[in-house]
Amino acid sequence: MSARFAGKSVLVTGAGSGIGRAVALAFAAEGARVTVAGRSAGPLEETVALIGKEGGTAVAVTADVTRSEEVRALVSRAVEHFGGLDVAVNNAGVFRGGGPVADLPEEDWRTLLDINVTGVLLSLQAEVVRMREQPTGGAIVNISSNLGAHTRIPGVAGYLTTKAAVSALTRAAALDHIADGVRINAVSPGPAATTMSLRRGESDAGRAERMKDESPLGRVSSTAEIAAAVLYLASSDAASVVGTDLVVDGGAAA
């Protein structure tokens, strides 16, 4: 493993499981000091323990990304622990409200907007304010989805709308802040090896069988594959990549 992020301070939201945990582990494996954030302390401490087991450095900070004061405090804690903020990955998100638009519960709609869109906006604001003060600037990667701006399916309009918004917000923020030395991009995963891609009552084996027909690749992406895309966009290898939305979905949106 390389050390592309040796000594760098990296913040990952939604890092208690799934893609967020995989991203945190991947950064730590390449030398980063990682602040893992989420609403529940237990899963975050598990992520920290996994990183420590591999010889990495991490700290857990609980925060609700829908609350601006908590997001600002989260960024401050990351800076206090590790001396700055070089990379941020805004991964926190939820899936709610399966069914047609006419039957989408208002509560689900507002939850999706609050976490998936407002949560990303508040995180971007706090992160950029810090990064543009640093001589070295910083890099931000938002986790969007292949569902939304890239492809659509029936019955998930709320989720589609919020993830399309994340893709658009990423590009707008990238243009607004590249002159500040802050490089902003997005990764849009398709079905990955997480609980979110399982249908109700479906097993991992059942999903694997289903994906043989539903994905051109014939399988879900591993969380490590998603993490690799995130690390590329955050690295100096992508120094001239600004405002891109990298789709990692096995060809589903091709």
Image: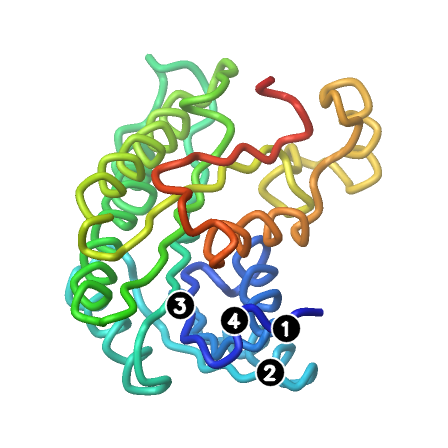
Percent from the top left, x then y, of residue 206?
81, 33
How many C-alpha atoms fall within 10 Å of the one at disc 3: few (<14), some, or many (≥20)?
many
Residue displayed at 84% across by 39% down:
205
Q: Nearer the viewer, mark 1 or mark 4?
A: 4
Q: Nearer the viewer, mark 2 or mark 4?
A: 4
Q: Which mark is residue 29?
A: 1
How many C-alpha atoms fall within 10 Å of the one at disc 2: few (<14), some, or many (≥20)?
many
Residue displayed at 56% across by 60% down:
23
Q: Amino acid at mark 1?
A: Ala
Q: Label 1, label 3: how many angstroms apart (C-alpha)?
A: 14 Å
Q: Label 2, label 1: how many angstroms apart (C-alpha)?
A: 6 Å
Query: Closest to the observer: 171 or 180?
Result: 180
Quarter of the image with the C terminus in it: top right
Q: Secondary structure at mark 2?
A: loop
Q: Which residue is mark 2?
A: 56
Query: Disc 2, disc 1: CB below 8 Å?
Result: yes
Query: Closest to the observer: 62 or 32?
Result: 32
Query: Disc 1, disc 3: CB below 8 Å?
Result: no
Q: Which residue is mark 4?
A: 5
Q: Amino acid at mark 4?
A: Phe
Label located before the other in sequence (1 or 4): 4
Q: Quadrant of residue 208?
A: top right
How many C-alpha atoms fall within 10 Å of the one at disc 1: few (<14), some, or many (≥20)?
many
Percent from the top left, x then y, of residue 95?
45, 38
Q: Which residue is mark 3?
A: 11
Query: Disc 1, disc 4: CB below 8 Å?
Result: no
Answer with left or right where residue 139 lies relative to residue 196: left
Give the vertical position of 81 relative to 22 (above or below): below
Q: Secondary structure at mark 4?
A: loop
